[in-house]
Image: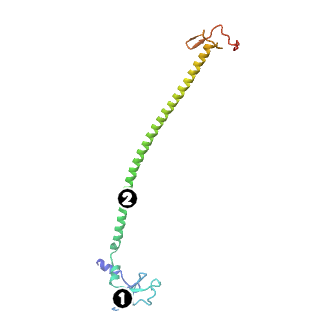
């Protein structure tokens, strides 16, 4: 039995199993609910005898019969081809996007490295600026202290100091106070 004969044997009346009980005047009808019935078994043309739904019947001619007898692989080959095209397109898109992600990750890594370099340079500049500011502040303080010392020296030259260590000596980090120094002696300003 070849394929067409096999497919032909699948089209028969669902009640009397025509073509086995075939008479000369028998023809097959197909309903919209896809039930096949011969004209001998049909009682009403408005209702399907198999499922009792309201429907209409159409004679099963060669064009309808050829559509029903078509090889199912032919029917499914086009949707399968379309599905395969869509799947391969999706896979190609996914691969492209994966490559783009790799590129952008590398760029992100380089950008982070560049940001870190710029941050460290900025911190170094800030440190140098603060050092320069501290130096200038320290220089200003040193100048002020020197000015104060100079002014006090000038004043001390003019007047006698309360603490006069002129006859004291400084040796190895120690200050030796003269013997005649009395820390409790009261000095009065003139």
Foreground of the two, 118 or 80 = 118
Q: Position of residue 140 (x, y in %)?
A: 54, 26
Q: Position of residue 117 (x, y in %)?
A: 43, 39
Mark sitting earlier along the chain (2/1)? 1
Which quarter of the picture shows residue 137?
top right
Which quarter of the picture shows residue 172?
top right
The residue where tag 2 is placed is 93
- Residue lying at the far left in this picture: please name it: 2
Q: Secondary structure at mark 1?
A: loop
Q: Nearer the viewer, mark 2 or mark 1?
A: 2
Foreground of the two, 9 or 77 = 77
**Labels 2 and 1 touching (C-beta < 8 A):** no
**Alpha carbon of mark 2 to alpha carbon of mark 1: how far?**
54 Å
Q: Would residue 185 be found to the left or right of residue 136 on screen?
A: right
The residue where tag 1 is placed is 27
- Residue lying at the far top in this picture: please name it: 180
Foreground of the two, 3 or 69 = 69
Q: Residue at x 34, y 70 (%)?
A: 78
Say which quadrant the N terminus sits in: bottom left
Graded by Cα atoms within 10 Å as few (under 14), some (14 to 19) or many (20 or more), the crowding at tag 2 reads: few
Q: Is residue 147 above or below residue 183?
A: below
Q: Is residue 4 above or below residue 99?
A: below
- Number of marks in the image? 2
Q: Position of residue 86 (x, y in %)?
A: 37, 64
Say which quadrant the C terminus sits in: top right
Q: Secondary structure at mark 2?
A: helix
Q: Would residue 115 be found to the left or right of residue 75 on screen?
A: right
Q: Residue at x 35, y 67 (%)?
A: 82
Graded by Cα atoms within 10 Å as few (under 14), some (14 to 19) or many (20 or more), the crowding at tag 1 reads: some
Q: Residue at x 59, y 16 (%)?
A: 154
Q: Residue at x 38, y 61 (%)?
A: 90
Q: Position of residue 70 (x, y in %)?
A: 33, 77
């Amino acid at each position: 039995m070849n394929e067409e004969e096999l497919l032909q044997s699948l089209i028969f009346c669902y009640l009397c199993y025509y073509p086995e009980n075939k008479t000369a005047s028998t023809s097959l009808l197909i309903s919209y609910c896809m039930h096949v019935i011969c004209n001998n078994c049909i009682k009403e043309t408005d209702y399907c005898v198999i499922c009792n739904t309201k429907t209409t019947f159409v004679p099963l001619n060669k064009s309808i019969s050829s559509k029903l007898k078509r090889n199912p692989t032919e029917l499914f080959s086009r949707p399968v081809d379309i599905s395969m095209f869509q799947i391969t397109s999706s896979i190609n898109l996914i691969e492209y996007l994966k490559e783009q992600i790799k590129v952008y990750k590398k760029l992100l890594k380089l950008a982070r490295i560049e940001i870190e370099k710029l941050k460290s340079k900025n911190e170094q500049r800030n440190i140098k600026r603060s050092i320069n500011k501290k130096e200038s502040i320290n220089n200003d303080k040193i100048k002020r202290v020197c000015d104060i010392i100079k002014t006090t020296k000038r004043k001390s030259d003019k007047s006698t100091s309360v603490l006069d260590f002129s006859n004291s000596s400084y040796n190895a980090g120690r200050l030796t106070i003269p013997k005649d120094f009395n820390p409790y002696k009261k000095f009065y300003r003139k």
